[in-house]
Amino acid sequence: METWRIFAASLLGVAGILAVLMIMARVRERTGRWQAVAVTGLVGVTALALTGILTLTVLAPAVAWWLAGGTAVIVAVLALAG
């Protein structure tokens, strides 16, 4: 496995976990129901795991880096805005 794939997947994983946590917090604020928060977390972690596996295995370098970098930028903007 190429080193760049590991770095891209790591960046995606860290940024993705933070994104999932921020989205779960917003769902909790809006609904107040733990069931909705749990479903949101499950969907988010599943999507993150799928994109991480695709980044590690089959995505083209440009797509993998755009996905990882875009996620990191979005999380940074959400963290600064919130």
Image (spheres, grey):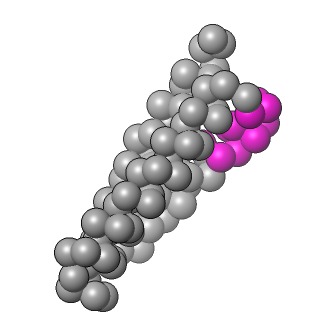
Q: Quadrant of the C terminus?
A: bottom left
Which of these two is toward me, 39 or 22? 39
- Taking the magenta stretch, the answer to whether it contains residue 63 is yes
Q: Quadrant of the N terminus?
A: top right
In the rendered view, would you say 45 is above or below 53?
A: below
Can residue 34 be seen in this snapshot?
yes
In the rendered view, would you say 49 is above or below 80?
A: above
Where is residue 22? Give x, y as percent.
Answer: 34, 65
Where is residue 75? Give x, y as percent.
Answer: 46, 58
Q: Seen in the image, is 31 located left or right of residue 51?
A: left
Q: What stretch of residues is rendered in magenta? A: 59-68
Question: Image point 64% across, 35% down: which residue?
Answer: 54
Residue 55 figure quarter? top right
Can residue 80 be seen in this snapshot?
no
Residue 8 figure quarter? top right
Q: Seen in the image, is 25 located left or right of residue 50?
A: left
Question: Image point 38% across, 67% down: which residue?
Answer: 40
Question: Image point 20% across, 75% down: which residue?
Answer: 34
Q: Seen in the image, is 65 located left or right of residue 22?
A: right
Question: Image point 73% across, 29% down: which residue?
Answer: 58
In the rendered view, would you say 57 is above or below 42?
A: above
- Taking the magenta stretch, the answer to whether it contains residue 58 is no
Magenta-highlighted stretch: main secondary structure?
helix
Where is residue 61? Give x, y as percent.
Answer: 76, 30
Where is residue 36? Give x, y as percent.
Answer: 31, 76
